[in-house]
Image (cartoon, rainbow, N blue to C red):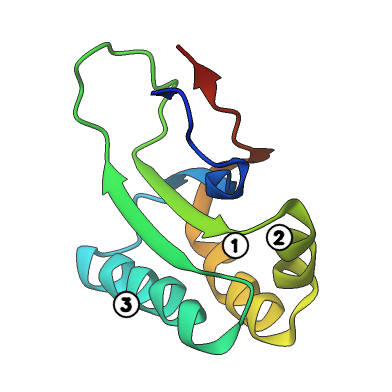
């Protein structure tokens, strides 16, 4: 992300990104319920500031089979660590994991490029 000069360092955020492929036997309705459960973690875990998700738009065809992306926003990477250890996250992860054929997770602190 490029920003104009003068953008405050405070605008940096930490992201928790999940790429997922659901098992074939998991229905669309089950997937929607799992996504709603994931989104509800924003209401249960204070460091989690927002949640967004989407499916592959098939533009570059470089997905390696992943079909869904889940993006959670935090103020810091310490917030991600608190989220991962939170009982609500652990309980939710125990529901989500059995539905996934494969998953990839990445956490990062965003960096702003001053132009």
| Residue closest to the eye, 29 or 13 | 13
Locate residue 11, reporting x and y percent. 52, 47
**Crowding near the residue tagged with mark 2, few <14, some 14–19, many ≥20 C-alpha atoms within 10 Å:** many
Q: Secondary structure at mark 2?
A: helix
Whichever of labels 3 and 2 marks the residue nearer the N terminus, that label is 3
**Crowding near the residue tagged with mark 3, few <14, some 14–19, many ≥20 C-alpha atoms within 10 Å:** few
Residue at 33% in and 53% down: 53
Work out whether 96 lies above or below 24: below
Quarter of image, res 37 = bottom left
Q: Which residue corresponds to mark 1?
A: 97
Q: Which residue corresponds to mark 2?
A: 80
Query: Are the residues tagged 3 and 1 within 8 Å (C-beta)?
Result: no
Q: Which residue corresponds to mark 3?
A: 33
Q: Secondary structure at mark 1?
A: helix
Quarter of image, res 50 = bottom left
State the quadrant of the C terminus: top left
Locate residue 110, reporting x and y percent. 59, 35
Question: Which one is closest to the eye, mark 1 or mark 2?
Answer: 2
Whichever of labels 1 and 2 marks the residue nearer the N terminus, that label is 2
Residue at 48% in and 35% down: 7
CA distance separating discs 3 and 2: 23 Å
């Amino acid at each position: 992300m490029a920003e104009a000069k003068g953008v405050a360092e405070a605008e940096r955020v930490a992201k928790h990104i999940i790429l997922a492929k659901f098992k074939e036997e998991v229905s669309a309705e089950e997937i929607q319920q799992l996504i709603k459960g994931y989104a509800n973690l924003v209401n249960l875990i204070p460091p989690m500031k927002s949640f967004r998700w989407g499916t592959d738009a098939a533009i570059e065809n470089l997905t390696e089979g992943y079909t869904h992306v889940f993006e959670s926003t935090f103020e810091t990477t310490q917030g991600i660590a608190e989220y991962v250890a939170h009982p609500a996250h652990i309980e939710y992860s125990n529901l989500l994991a059995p539905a996934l054929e494969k998953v990839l997770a990445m956490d990062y602190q965003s960096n702003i490029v001053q132009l």
